[in-house]
Each structure stands twice: as structure tokens, then as C-alpha cells.
Image: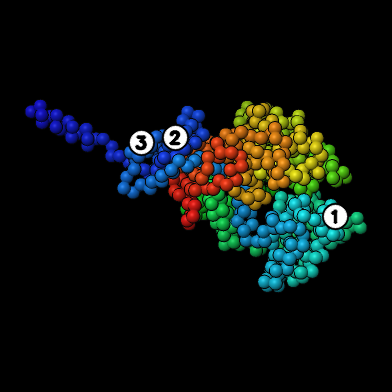
């Protein structure tokens, strides 16, 4: 009888024990840096569905392997939390691959030749678009020129039947040909729009270059071309490019309500393979009308959130559009351009606070940064939770030393792009002089030492979405000319990785679900070919992405289709 009771007791215990649930994905035999201080380096991780269910030793994850589990033996490779693009332009990244790539051109003559070839293949009236030119990176100045900028005549001569718009690398200026200028109603007598400039020569002739809001006069002629199919294709191309470079989440620095609705449909259809956190780029009037009742939060399985409002206080340094406290060294008649006025920014701040969104202000010049911090402080000081609003300054490139400690004091995120430093560094002192360059340009070390949080990114398509050159820039400040841009402001290896993982997640109120590899968080993982935390500086550039994993699914494999 006792044996019978014992038998039934054992049977009952077995029957009541939950069946082992196999993992869908297991990574093992790796050097896995988790960014979790309590468990910093592990051998393996396991995911079931979108979440991590084990983070630890090989034994911890191997016990979850079943017949249908995908197992990846990392062979000692480095795996890190899925890399986050902390400031980029998602649709513009896709669009850039659909037009002329002008990033590597030697001079203006090469641009003219590329446009001539495109015009020969185009139907009359078809737009010719391009992006990526930067006059400071050309081997020679065009003749004639205005502050190094070319006249449109040569461009117009090779494209008389096609409107042309070529966007500056920064996105803050365009070159247009005669037909595009005519379509936009621009001639020598056209007044500059508020916050913009139609560049003219000493005789008042419009040369065809448009800065800041003046771009919109030509860009507005394109609106009818961007139908849903085209925009969807841009999104698909942007996602493919991001995944191929290890990006699992993308903080999109400016999309419209209409574009968000497309992202919403794609997320609901499972057609958005990269997680998007979006800043709304709409006028205050449009926001006031559209925000009541509007909420997009972790939709489609945490693939889409609208978390911010984007504002542009100034332009870019390369186009002399950054708003400076003192005049430009190489253009002493100018302190740059103010695009959104302080009062307009105050209204944006009111809307952001009312609807629980982060205010994300593009500020490159030291005056733009000061204005942003001043207006942020008005709201932050008035609210008991003000220092946890996590409002952001996008770029924060050039700061007055007095404003550096204010980021930490106010709880403001510095969303910065290290690769801008090494890309632009050779000509930054030409714009603002050595003193302002050393005391205020790309002040990562000073900001971090003050306690500020830096979210890293590339500002793609201004720069490549590839995080490896960006990481290398952060830890070396080595420019393409072989010189180092003020070495003392470098980040450590861990700081640079934090800026693209847990700190970027924090900058979007998403550190509870991403940015580190912990049980219960999203299984977003990037696997790299080299250990960027330990290899010599000169090997970082050779690092490749082996796997990009989003929500436990392998979205990209090196040398194979995503």
C-alpha cells in the first residue's frame, strides 16, 4: 500500500511539473556584453517570442534548446544589446538610395557631369534629385563662387528640361537649377523667407543655392510625387540599410502625422522590421489640432512609438546656418540663422508638456543651444517632475562653456553624433576659429564628466547609418586627414557603447525594454566580428556586423539575405 501511495505521489508530482518551454533562439559561446551592471558579461542568451528568457552561461541557455530552436554558435564573437540609432532621418535614409549620391564627389564639375548623365536618361519634366555635396570637402572651389558655393549656370546648361534639386550633406541647403528656381517662383527679387536665405552675389543675383527654410520653396514642388507606394519603398530601403549595419531601433528625427500613419500600418502588418521611436515634425498649429486624442505607444509589438516633438532652432555649421553667439570667423557679417523663434519654441514646449511628449530641439550653434536650454528651464523649473521630462537637444555641437553643466542640472539629454566631429573637424576652425573650437566643439568628455547623458547616432543620411565609424570617432576623434580633433574630449570604449545602447534607450524612456540584455527585455541583439571594446584603435574600422536580431528574429546575416 505504501508503495502504491509513493507511486501515485511521484506520478502526481511529474504531472504537475510544467513542461519545459523551449527557446526559439539561442546564442552561445560568445562574449556577450549585456550593459547590465549586475551581470556584465555572459556566454549565452536565449529568447522566446520577442523576449529574453535566459542570460548567463552556456549551460543556462543550452537547457532551453529544443528540436525547433535556432542555435547560433558565436564562436567567441562579441554580441551587444541591439544598437540604437539615436538621431537619424528614417525616410530620408531610404530616399537617399533612390537619388544621386554626392557624398564622394571631388568637385562641382563632377556633380555637373552626374546630373548631365541623369538628364540624358530622364523624361522631360522628371525631377533629378541628389544629396551629399559639401563645398568644404571639394578639391577645388568652383569659379565663379560665393563663399565657395557655385552658380547654377553649369548645372542648368546640362539639364534644361529637368528640374534639379541637390541637397547639401547637412540637409540645410540645396542647389537648384534654373528650371527648379522658375517652378518655385524664385528670381533675383524674391525676398528671403523667415529663417532662410536665397544666396546672392554682390550684384544681387540669386546663384541657385538656398539655405534653411528657403529650401522649402523648391522642395514644395515635389510633394505630389511622394505617394504612399514611394514612401513605403523609402521605409523598406531604410530598414534594410539599418539592419545591415546592426541597427535594431531607430530614433527618427522628424516625421509628419501622415507618415506616422503609414508606419502604423506597416507595424500592424508586421512590415516594420526596425523599431521606430518618432519625433513629430509639424507646425505648432498642426500639433494643436492633431495631438488631442493622438497616442502611438509601443504599437505592433513595440515596433512604433511617437515620443517627441521636433523643432529646428537653427541650421548647420557647414552651410553657415548654425546660430552663433558671435559672428563666423570666415563670414564675419553673419551669426547664422534662427529658424524657430524663441516664442514659437515656447509654444512647442507648452504642447510637449501638455501631451506628455519630449521636446527635441535641433540646436547646433552656441546661441541656439543657449536659447533651447533657457526655454527648457522655464518649463522644467515650473514642474515638480521637470528634471525627468528628458527633453533633448539634438546635436548640441557647439556650446558656450557656461552652458555645458546645464544639461545635467536640467536633466536634458544631449543627442549627439560623434562622426560629425571627425567628418567636419578639418574645416570647423575655419568657421568659428581655434578658441571656440577647443572650448565648445563636440564636448563629449566635458558633458559626460558633468553627469549629462549622451545619446549617440549618425544623423543619417547626413552620414552613413553605419555605427562603426561613429564608434571609432567617439573613442579616437581621428579625422580623415589623419589628425585628431582635440583629443581630450574623447569617450571611453564603454561610454561610446552606452551612448548607442542603454543611454540611447534612456533618452527615449525605453530603458525598461531595451538597451541592455536582461531577462524580460526585448531580444534585440547585434553581433560584431571584432571586440570593439578591446581591439586596437586602428582595427575598429574593419569591424563588420555578423547578425542583427530584432525581437528574437534574425533580420540580417552577413553574406546572406536578411
Tag 3's secondary structure? helix
Does residue 29 lie above or below 168 as drawn?
above
Q: Determine if residue 253 is in view.
A: no
Q: Percent x, y for residue 456?
A: 62, 40
Question: Which mark, by number, is residue 42?
Answer: 2
Residue at 79% in and 69% down: 157
Give the labeled residue for mark 3. Answer: 59
Give the labeled residue for mark 1. Answer: 146
- Return the residue found at the far left: 1
- Return the residue found at the far right: 203
Q: Percent x, y for residue 433?
A: 82, 39
Give the mark, 1 or 2, whose residue is nearer the N terminus: 2
The N terminus - image quarter: top left
Q: Percent x, y for residue 304?
A: 53, 47
In the image, taking residue 12 as reference, residue 62 lies left or right, namely: right
**Disc 1 versus disc 3: distance between alpha carbons?**
67 Å
Tag 1's secondary structure? strand
Q: Are marks 1 and 2 in contact (CB under 8 Å)?
A: no
Q: Determine if residue 554 is in view.
A: yes
Residue at 48% in and 31% down: 40
Tag 2's secondary structure? strand
Amino acid at each position: 500500500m505504501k508503495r502504491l501511495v509513493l507511486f501515485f505521489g511521484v506520478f502526481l508530482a511529474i504531472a504537475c511539473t510544467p513542461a519545459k518551454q523551449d527557446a526559439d533562439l539561442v546564442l552561445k559561446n560568445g562574449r556577450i556584453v549585456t550593459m547590465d551592471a549586475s551581470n556584465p558579461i555572459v556566454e549565452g542568451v536565449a529568447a522566446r517570442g520577442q523576449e529574453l528568457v535566459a542570460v548567463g552561461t552556456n549551460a543556462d541557455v543550452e537547457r532551453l534548446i529544443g528540436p525547433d530552436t535556432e542555435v547560433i554558435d558565436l564562436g567567441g564573437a562579441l554580441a551587444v544589446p541591439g544598437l540604437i540609432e539615436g538621431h537619424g532621418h528614417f525616410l530620408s535614409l531610404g530616399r537617399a538610395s533612390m537619388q544621386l549620391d554626392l557624398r564622394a564627389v571631388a568637385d562641382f564639375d563632377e556633380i555637373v557631369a552626374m546630373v548631365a548623365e541623369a538628364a540624358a536618361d530622364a523624361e522631360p519634366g522628371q525631377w533629378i534629385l541628389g544629396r551629399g555635396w559639401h563645398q568644404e570637402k571639394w578639391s577645388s572651389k568652383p569659379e565663379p563662387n560665393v563663399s565657395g558655393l557655385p552658380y547654377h549656370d553649369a548645372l542648368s546648361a546640362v539639364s534644361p528640361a529637368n528640374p534639379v534639386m541637390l541637397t547639401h550633406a547637412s540637409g540645410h541647403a540645396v542647389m537648384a537649377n534654373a528650371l527648379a528656381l522658375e517652378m518655385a517662383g524664385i528670381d533675383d527679387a524674391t525676398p528671403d523667407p523667415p529663417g532662410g536665405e536665397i544666396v546672392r552675389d554682390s550684384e544681387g543675383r540669386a546663384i541657385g543655392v538656398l539655405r534653411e527654410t528657403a529650401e522649402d520653396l523648391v522642395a514644395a514642388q515635389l510633394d505630389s510625387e511622394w505617394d504612399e507606394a514611394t514612401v513605403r519603398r523609402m521605409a523598406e530601403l531604410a530598414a534594410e540599410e539599418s539592419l545591415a549595419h546592426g541597427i535594431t531601433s531607430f530614433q527618427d528625427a522628424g516625421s509628419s502625422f501622415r507618415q506616422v500613419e503609414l508606419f502604423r500600418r506597416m507595424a500592424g502588418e508586421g512590415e516594420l522590421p526596425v523599431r521606430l521611436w518618432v519625433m513629430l515634425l509639424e507646425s505648432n498649429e498642426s500639433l494643436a489640432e492633431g495631438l488631442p486624442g493622438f497616442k502611438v505607444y509601443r504599437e505592433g509589438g513595440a515596433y512604433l512609438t511617437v515620443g517627441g516633438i521636433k523643432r529646428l532652432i537653427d541650421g548647420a555649421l557647414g552651410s553657415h546656418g548654425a546660430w552663433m553667439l558671435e559672428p563666423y570667423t570666415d563670414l564675419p557679417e553673419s551669426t547664422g540663422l534662427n529658424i524657430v523663434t524663441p516664442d514659437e519654441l515656447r509654444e512647442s514646449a507648452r504642447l510637449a508638456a501638455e501631451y506628455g511628449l519630449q521636446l527635441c530641439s535641433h540646436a547646433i550653434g552656441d546661441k541656439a543651444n543657449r536659447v533651447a536650454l533657457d526655454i527648457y528651464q522655464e518649463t522644467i523649473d515650473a514642474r515638480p517632475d521637470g528634471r525627468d521630462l528628458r527633453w533633448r537637444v539634438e546635436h548640441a555641437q557647439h556650446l558656450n562653456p557656461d552652458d555645458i553643466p546645464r544639461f545635467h542640472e536640467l536633466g536634458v539629454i544631449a543627442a549627439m553624433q560623434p562622426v560629425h566631429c571627425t567628418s567636419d573637424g578639418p574645416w570647423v576652425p575655419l568657421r568659428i576659429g581655434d578658441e571656440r573650437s577647443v572650448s565648445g566643439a563636440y564636448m563629449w568628455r566635458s558633458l559626460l564628466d558633468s553627469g549629462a547623458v549622451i545619446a549617440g547616432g549618425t544623423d543619417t543620411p547626413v552620414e552613413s547609418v553605419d555605427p562603426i565609424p561613429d564608434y571609432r570617432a567617439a573613442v579616437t576623434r581621428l579625422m580623415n586627414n589623419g589628425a585628431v580633433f582635440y583629443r581630450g574630449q574623447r569617450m571611453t570604449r564603454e561610454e561610446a557603447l552606452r551612448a548607442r545602447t542603454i543611454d540611447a534607450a534612456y533618452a527615449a524612456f525605453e530603458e525598461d525594454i531595451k538597451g541592455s540584455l536582461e531577462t524580460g527585455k526585448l531580444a534585440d541583439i547585434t553581433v560584431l566580428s571584432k571586440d570593439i571594446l578591446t581591439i586596437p584603435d586602428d582595427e575598429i574600422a574593419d569591424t563588420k556586423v555578423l547578425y542583427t536580431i530584432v525581437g528574437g528574429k534574425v533580420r540580417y546575416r552577413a553574406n546572406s539575405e536578411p
